Image: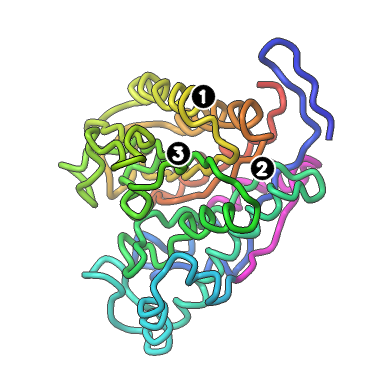
């Protein structure tokens, strides 16, 4: 790989891994459910229409499955067993009513985790020049150690954080979340962790699930000051997002200075999403991704993993996620 710096600009001969396959599409709760299999196909259709599948800067990767030993790095054994049993029955709920079980939910959820872990492997080992990776069905930020939540069965983010430390010796990690919903399954499981720097910009929890993520929540104990929650009022637009995201840029650059960036880029913050009230356009995703891409080269040797997260308007998903990929292959920032 060759990197040349001119002022604050750089040129990088690198690749971005993009994951696609029916194994990821199977993570969905039925046609009538907001989180359904059409989401990934909507993204893929636009991805191919833009000829991104033919770009020499992109490497298409197949999904991979995580075994139980990997899942257990983050999740309780009792909960893993519950998901396995519910997967065979294909009925009931994995939480208090948001996340229904379906036949094969254990396997499809394990593919989401395994694919995010493969993304970690590729960017850490720079396989074939890959520094960036995008898992469109990753970013299941509501799952807790012992339960599902908000359509999220296993928390791939939590597993990635722990494996990055255990396998690659990474210490300081920045997790940035622009999904409309607060990433409670990440925040509260790492609230006391001083080396996971969380910046989460989301709709005010007084108006939206899960009702958490107040700006006063900045971490506990030794982790105080390593967490940043930004609450956005309903109907906030692109300009509001651009203004507030400057706080995240300063937080990552001046406080976190991470060795790895994990970016949850949910598309449910865009205008027209059926479950939320924010009014961004896909320009917000382009803006955030451009900033984090640049910061990854300034602090993390280019290592950034993007995860699709939420989003329930198919056109918004296609627009937002293709902007993410286009940003990651833009070498002149």
Apparent side of residue 34 relative to residue 51 in the rendered image (left or right): left
User: Disc 2 versus disc 1: distance between alpha carbons?
Assistant: 19 Å
Q: Residues within 10 Å of mark 2 (few under 14, many from 20)?
A: many
Apparent side of residue 287 relative to residue 2 in the rendered image (left or right): left
Quarter occupied by the N terminus: top right
Q: Marks 1 and 3: in contact by CB < 8 Å?
A: no
Which residue is disc 3 drawn over? 176
Which residue occupies the foreground of this view, 18 or 222?
A: 222
Q: Secondary structure at mark 2?
A: strand
Quarter occupied by the C terminus: top right
Of circles 2 and 1, which is in front? 1
User: In the picture, residue 270 is in which quadrant?
Assistant: top left
Question: Sequence order check: which comes first, mark 3 or mark 2?
Answer: 2
Colour treatment of the image: rainbow
Residue 156 rendering spot, x and y as whole percentages? 49, 59
Q: Residues within 10 Å of mark 3 (few under 14, many from 20)?
A: many
User: Disc 3 versus disc 1: distance between alpha carbons?
Assistant: 12 Å
Q: Which residues are magenta?
A: 42-65
Question: Which residue corresponds to the image point at 48% horizontal and 34% vertical from the top-left?
Answer: 285
Image: 241 above or below 46: above
User: In the picture, residue 7 is in which quadrant?
Assistant: top right
Magenta stretch contains residue 50: yes
Which residue is disc 2 drawn over? 132
Q: Secondary structure at mark 1?
A: helix
Image: 137 above or below 86: above
Which residue is disc 1 drawn over? 253
Magenta stretch contains residue 321: no
Question: Which residue corresponds to the image point at 67% horizontal and 35% vertical from the top-left?
Answer: 302
């Amino acid at each position: 790989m060759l990197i040349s710096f001119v002022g604050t600009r750089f040129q990088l001969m690198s690749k971005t891994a993009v994951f696609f396959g029916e194994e990821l599409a199977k993570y969905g709760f039925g046609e009538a459910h907001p989180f359904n299999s059409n989401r990934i196909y909507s993204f893929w259709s636009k991805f191919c229409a833009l000829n991104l599948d033919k770009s020499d800067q992109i490497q298409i990767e197949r999904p991979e499955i995580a075994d139980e030993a990997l899942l257990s790095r983050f999740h309780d054994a009792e909960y893993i067993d519950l998901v396995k049993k519910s997967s065979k029955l294909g009925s009931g709920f994995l939480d208090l009513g948001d996340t229904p079980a379906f036949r094969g939910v254990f396997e499809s959820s394990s593919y989401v985790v395994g694919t995010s872990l493969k993304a970690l492997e590729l960017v850490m080992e720079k396989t074939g020049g890959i520094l960036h990776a995008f898992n469109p069905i990753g970013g299941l930020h509501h799952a807790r150690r012992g339960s599902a939540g908000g359509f999220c069965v296993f928390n791939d983010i939590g597993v990635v954080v722990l494996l990055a430390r255990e396998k690659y010796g990474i210490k300081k990690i920045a997790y940035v979340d622009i999904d409309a919903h607060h990433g409670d399954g990440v925040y509260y499981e790492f609230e006391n962790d001083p080396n996971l720097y969380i910046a989460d910009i989301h709709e005010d929890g007084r108006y939206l699930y899960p009702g958490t993520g107040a700006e006063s929540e900045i971490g506990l104990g030794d982790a105080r000051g390593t967490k940043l929650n930004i609450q956005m009022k309903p109907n906030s637009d692109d300009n509001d997002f651009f203004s507030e995201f400057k706080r995240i840029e300063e937080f990552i650059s001046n406080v976190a200075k991470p060795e790895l960036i994990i970016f949850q880029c949910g598309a449910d913050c865009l205008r027209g999403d059926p479950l939320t009230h924010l009014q961004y356009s896909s320009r917000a995703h382009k803006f955030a991704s451009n900033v984090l891409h640049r910061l990854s080269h300034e602090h993390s040797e280019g290592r950034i993993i993007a995860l699709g997260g939420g989003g329930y308007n198919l056109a918004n998903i296609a627009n937002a996620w293709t902007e993410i990929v286009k940003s990651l292959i833009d070498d002149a920032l």
